[in-house]
């Protein structure tokens, strides 16, 4: 992470064992989320430079656009190979500290490997290597 005004490096978030392919701030700006070729999506606390959460997947997306107020920032979608997983942060917080792995609340198998994911409201757009875009409806988002 660099300071935009000075260009100085503020911190380096280390933990992935392969190339990092995507990075984004969480909606509240408190965390940085990174996806990697090591099949992990990691959440980093900006204030402490520490990893606070890890999910399976190389790609990730947050719900953007019109969503119900109580779901904003709650769900994260990850993808690896031909599998899309939807996680509920509220359920993960219930297991914080007990060592239990996060379980997805929903999943989808694409006809081909997933190359991109975008979520707008209750629609999840999945770009596949077959030259197709699958549009999934997830009304609980």
Image: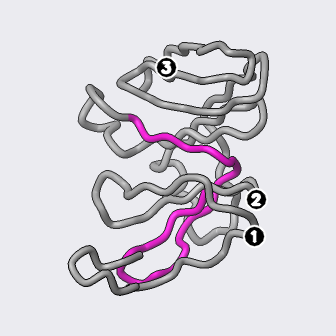
Residue 134 in the image, given as x and y percentages of width and height:
60, 14
Classed neighbour count for the residue bearing mark 2: other residues with Cα under 10 Å, few (<14), some (14–19), many (≥20): some
Numbered circle sitting on residue 46: none
Residue tagged 3: 138
Looking at the image, tell me whether mark 3 or mark 2 is earlier in sequence order: 2
Which residue sits at x=70%, y=51%? Answer: 56
Q: Secondary structure at mark 2?
A: loop
Looking at the image, tell me whether mark 1 or mark 3 is earlier in sequence order: 1
Is the Cβ of the residue at disc 1 closer than 8 Å to that at disc 2?
Answer: yes
Which residue sits at x=69%, y=30%? Answer: 114
Which one is in front, 70 or 46?
Answer: 46
Task: Check the image and report above or below for 6 versus 30.
Answer: below
User: Which callout, 1 or 3, points to the residue nearer the camera?
Assistant: 1
Spatial separation of the CA atoms under disc 3 and disc 2 = 27 Å
Residue tagged 2: 38
Residue 139 in the image, given as x and y percentages of width and height:
43, 17
Taking 12 as reference, is 105 left or right?
right
Q: Residue furthest left?
A: 5
Taking 5 as reference, is 47 left or right?
right
Task: Check the image and report above or below for 87 versus 66.
Answer: below
Residue 27 in the image, given as x and y percentages of width and height:
31, 51
Task: Check the image and report above or below for 133 versus 17.
Answer: above
Taking 10 as reference, is 54 left or right?
right
Which residue sits at x=34%, y=34%? Answer: 64
Q: Locate the N terminus and report the quarter of the image it occupies.
A: bottom left
Q: Secondary structure at mark 3?
A: loop
Residue tagged 1: 17
Residue range (magenta): 41-63
């Amino acid at each position: 992470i660099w300071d935009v005004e000075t260009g100085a490096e503020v911190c380096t978030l280390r933990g992935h064992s392969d190339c990092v392919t995507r990075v984004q701030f969480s909606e509240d700006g408190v965390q940085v989320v990174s996806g990697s070729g090591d099949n992990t999506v990691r959440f980093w606390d900006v204030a402490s430079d520490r990893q606070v959460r890890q999910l399976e997947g190389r790609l990730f997306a947050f719900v953007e656009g019109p969503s119900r107020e109580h779901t904003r920032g709650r769900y994260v979608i990850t993808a690896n190979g031909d599998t899309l997983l939807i996680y509920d942060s509220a359920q993960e917080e219930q297991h914080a500290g007990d060592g239990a792995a996060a379980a997805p609340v929903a999943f989808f198998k694409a006809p081909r490997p997933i190359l991109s994911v975008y979520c707008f409201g209750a629609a999840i757009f999945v770009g596949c290597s077959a030259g197709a875009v699958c549009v999934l409806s997830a009304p609980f988002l």
